[in-house]
Image: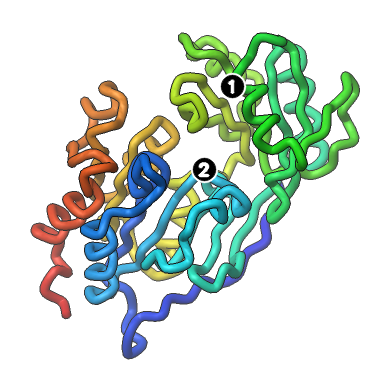
Amino acid sequence: MIISQEIPSSDRSKGEPPSGLFVCDFDGTLLRSDRSFSNADLKALKQLDELGIVRVIATGRSIYSLNTVSISELPVDFIIFSSGAGVIQHPAGHIIRKVSLEAHEVSRAIEILQADDLDFMVHRPIPDNHIFGYFESTPANEDFKRRIHLYSQFTFPLDEASDGFGPATQLLAILPPGDCQPVLDNIRKKLPDFNVIQTTSPLDGQSIWIEVFPTNVSKSLTVSWLTAEFDLDSAQTLSIGNDYNDLDLLEWTGSSFVVENAPDDIKDRFPVVASHNESGVAEAIQRWLATAPFKDSK
């Protein structure tokens, strides 16, 4: 893997060190169905700043995809994007960390996914990871076709011998709706030194996306790096999410919540707050602050 990173900084008032860290998923958690943000959620995020708490978004979106939403005024300090492969200082937009697969790792992963007759994409390194090559095995995969159409100006087909792609941020296999566990288990078995993550398609809300990253890339691993840089530990953190690609993060942070619109099997494992359309983020923050030891530190 290839890692490039800088020391993060936070504009805490009077130079005081942060007292905690809050991290929130984006789509289906903070971002509402109409692509807007709840006023209550925004107010709660500003309250965290007053308490000296670092505010982080953790999303599977690329920088390009993030910029299709109006986020310039979003009151957060960092955006972890591409499921942890990159980190932006917000609102400056400066990339302070990026991780990619080396060329030989990419070739190996391509070979495995081709052998398993999967439909998949291979994404260029950050900041150009909205550009991808694709390999199609099954012509009836509508979600796969939809994503290619959505990014049509940035895509190109891969051939059978795609061993010269070079470094990549990730590979992304798209499966039709149904039981993906056998495929997921098989990929993890064949690629044990990669991090293989499951998420629900943000396009049709049903298809399964299987993302293949360097072994040190996930939301929790990148949040752990950021937390350590501020000399904080997991006990001083809160996360909130809504999908399977949030599980590692929800399990890592000291406090965790999921929104009402999360799948039932995830809601069975974590405390539940209101949906993304009903200010669930604000509810989670208030419940956390009611018991957090730093709530009266300012």
Color encoding of the figure = rainbow
- Residue drawn at 68 percent across, 45 percent down: 130
| Residue pointed to by mark 2 | 60
Q: Is residue 41 left or right of residue 248?
A: left
Q: How many residues crowd mark 2 within 10 Å: few (<14), some (14–19), many (20+)?
A: many
- Residue drawn at 78 percent across, 28 percent down: 108
- Residue drawn at 29 percent across, 69 percent down: 53
Q: How many marks overall?
A: 2
Secondary element at image label 2: loop
Q: Is residue 240 above or below residue 50?
A: above
Mark nearer the viewer, 2 or 1: 1
Q: Picture coordinates of residue 150 (x, y %)?
A: 65, 35
Q: Picture coordinates of residue 61 (x, y %)?
A: 54, 45
CB-based contact (under 8 Å), mark 2 and mark 1: no
- Residue drawn at 55 percent across, 63 percent down: 88
Q: Picture coordinates of residue 71 (x, y %)?
A: 46, 61
Secondary element at image label 1: helix
Q: Quadrant of the C terminus?
A: bottom left
Q: Is residue 291 left or right of residue 177?
A: left
Q: Is residue 256 above or below residue 212?
A: below
Q: Earlier in the sequence, mark 2 or mark 1?
A: 2
Is 33 in front, or is 12? 33
Q: Picture coordinates of residue 131 (x, y %)?
A: 74, 43
Q: Is residue 147 above or below residue 224?
A: above
Is 38 in front, or is 120? 38
Residue type, label 1? Asp
| Residue pointed to by mark 1 | 143
